[in-house]
Structures are given as C-alpha cells and as structure tokens.
Amino acid sequence: ASSCVATTHILQGMALSRLGKDQEADAELKIGKQMVSEKFQKKLEWGDNRSGVLPGWLMARIFLREADGQAKPPAQTTR
C-alpha cells in the first residue's frame, strides 16, 4: 500500500475524532498506524509511485504523531 493511503487513513481519523466520532476515528487511525508500522519495520528504501516514496512515509509518521497528540487532553498549566 502507498504512503498516500496511510496518510488518508490518519487524516480521516483525525477529522473524525474532531467530529466526536471516536469509534470511526479509532478504526481509521488503527489502519494508518499499522501501515506506517509495517513500513518502518522493514529496511527503508526510497520507494516508488506504487509503494510511496520515503518522504511520503515520513509525513505519514509525522501526521500519526500529531494524531496521537490530538487524542490527549491539553496539559494543564498552573499559575
């Protein structure tokens, strides 16, 4: 599968989460996370248009990190 497909799942999961559709969001994020995890467990290569090039996979990983941060409540500041 390509990096574009993984990124689509991640971004869709983030959007669904913002809409309060948590079960659907979790399902999309799980798919995207699995795709990214499988890619980074293998030897990293530049890739091609079919499998996605390395910068696309790196962006998918960054989006996934952002999605994980979105799921956590903001840190409380004390004054």
Image (cartoon, rainbow, N blue to C red):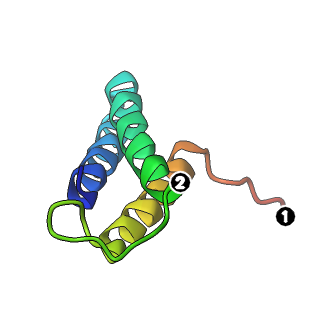
Front residue (pair 61, 54): 54
Q: Earlier in the sequence, mark 2 or mark 1?
A: 2
| Amino acid beneath label 2 | Gln
Name the residue rendered at 44%, 44% in the picture: 33
26 lies left or right of 11: right
Give the image location of residue 50, x and y in percent.
15, 61
The number of numbered discs placed on residues in the rendered structure image is: 2
Name the residue rendered at 49%, 49% in the picture: 37
Q: Quadrant of the C terminus?
A: bottom right
Front residue (pair 1, 56): 1
Name the residue rendered at 30%, 51% in the picture: 6
Spot the residue most to the top: 23
Front residue (pair 46, 7): 46
Give the image location of residue 30, x and y in percent.
42, 35
Q: Which residue is mark 1?
A: 79
Which disc is residue 41 wearing?
2
Regarding mark 1 in the picture, which secondary structure is present there? loop
| Amino acid beneath label 1 | Arg
